[in-house]
């Protein structure tokens, strides 16, 4: 095989992988290609530029090939452009300094088999957040974290499980009517509560960790997508400012999370600021954003970052928000279209139909 043939093969791979998101399938081996999109964009650019070393100016096939590669690269770039510093902010920087209306959050997938709870607790001491969200927590993690916090967080919701979907929520601020709900699966919990700021203003909080599409457990993304849509509709219907956070097991630019964002009307504080990749913490190359924070238009941003390595395959995700409802109109998103709402309902019905079959 000649060098040019190798370049053509690499370019063809880039084209095929670009087309995968257009395949209307929820099987894991299709949806998994949503994840390494940044890597695919770079790969396509390299394939495009390298091909010019063997470009034949008299060959119409070469012109067609580089045009197709260029179109693939532009398509991929458009999807990740919002998470570059060149895009405008969706959630603006804070305009007021009022500690009674601010809230800092740290969300961490601790990795259930991770034995080093001290690293996690040290990260809490470094960041000193008002709200802590831990996922993949079992009884051992519950005991270690509760002991390590030493009563610093008086309000809590604890769901220790051995199936990697346990959740722990600790708050310095009062929680009203905290609920544990199993939205699509009786083994996958989510937490829903009203959080009361020192200003006495209330925030609707949703914490989720939907199951990912995986060949050995859940070969399709039906459950994950349905849970995202259910929470999106709950957020849309809330009369309070809304925060949704957790490990989505999905990337920000995927069709499912994009639809979640459109239906809920929530904003992504990463837009215009960066990717803030949290998984895989053990790889500098194959890393993407799986842990998310979405907020309604009443919020402004004071800080956002990923934390230090805590022995998990996820990095902690940290954000500090300011509640400024008087500036909400400046950030309000357009209402979801009828077609987007139908798509959301379709994903929910699909999960319900699959459950009835079982």
Image (cartoon, helix red, strand yellow):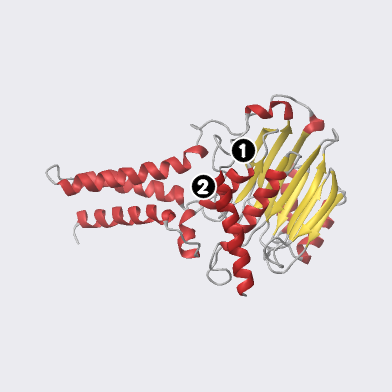
How far is disc 1 from disc 2 in space, using C-alphas? 14 Å
Residue at label 2?
A: 253
- The mark found on residue 269 in the picture is 1
Q: Earlier in the sequence, mark 1 or mark 2?
A: 2
Q: Residue furthest left?
A: 58
Give the side of residue 172 with respect to residue 71, left or right: right
Quadrant showing the C terminus: bottom right
Residue at x-position 66% and y-position 49%? 233
Q: Is residue 155 above or below residue 299?
A: below
Residue at x-position 77% and y-position 56%? 168
* Residue 104 falls in image quadrant: top right
Q: Is residue 227 above or below residue 253?
A: below
Give the side of residue 128 with respect to residue 82, left or right: right
Q: Is residue 335 above or below residue 114?
A: above
Q: Secondary structure at mark 2?
A: loop
Residue 160 in sight: yes
Q: Secondary structure at mark 1?
A: loop
Q: Residue furthest bottom?
A: 358
């Amino acid at each position: 095989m000649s060098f040019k043939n190798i370049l053509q093969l690499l370019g063809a791979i880039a084209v095929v992988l670009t087309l995968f998101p257009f395949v209307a399938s929820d099987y894991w081996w299709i949806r998994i290609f949503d994840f390494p999109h940044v890597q695919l964009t770079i790969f396509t650019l390299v394939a495009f530029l390298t091909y010019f070393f063997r470009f034949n100016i008299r060959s119409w096939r070469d012109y067609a090939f580089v045009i197709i590669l260029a179109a693939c690269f532009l398509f991929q770039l458009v999807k990740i452009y919002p998470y570059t510093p060149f895009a405008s902010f969706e959630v603006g920087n804070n305009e007021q300094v009022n500690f009674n209306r601010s809230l800092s959050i740290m969300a961490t997938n601790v990795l259930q088999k991770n034995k080093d709870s001290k690293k996690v607790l040290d990260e809490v001491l470094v960041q000193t957040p008002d709200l802590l969200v831990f996922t993949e927590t079992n009884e051992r993690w519950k005991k270690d974290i509760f002991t390590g916090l030493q009563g610093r967080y008086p309000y809590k919701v604890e769901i220790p499980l051995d199936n990697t979907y346990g959740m722990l929520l600790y708050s310095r601020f009062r929680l009203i009517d905290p609920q544990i709900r199993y939205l699509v699966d009786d083994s996958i919990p989510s937490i829903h509560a009203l959080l009361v700021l020192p200003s006495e203003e209330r925030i609707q909080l949703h914490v989720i960790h939907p199951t990912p599409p995986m060949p050995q457990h859940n070969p399709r993304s039906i459950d994950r997508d349905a849970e995202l849509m259910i929470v999106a509709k709950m957020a849309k219907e809330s009369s309070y400012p809304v925060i949704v956070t957790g490990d989505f097991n999905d990337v920000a630019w995927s069709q499912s999370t994009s639809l979640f964002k459109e239906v809920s009307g929530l904003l992504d504080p990463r837009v215009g600021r960066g990717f803030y990749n949290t998984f895989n913490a053990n790889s500098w190359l194959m890393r993407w954003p799986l842990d998310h924070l979405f907020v309604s238009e009443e919020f402004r941003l004071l800080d956002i970052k990923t934390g230090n390595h805590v022995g998990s395959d996820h990095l902690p995700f940290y954000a500090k928000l300011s509640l400024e409802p008087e500036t909400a109109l400046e950030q309000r998103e357009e209402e979801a279209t009828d077609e987007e709402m139908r798509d959301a309902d379709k994903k929910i019905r699909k999960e319900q139909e699959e459950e009835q079959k079982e």
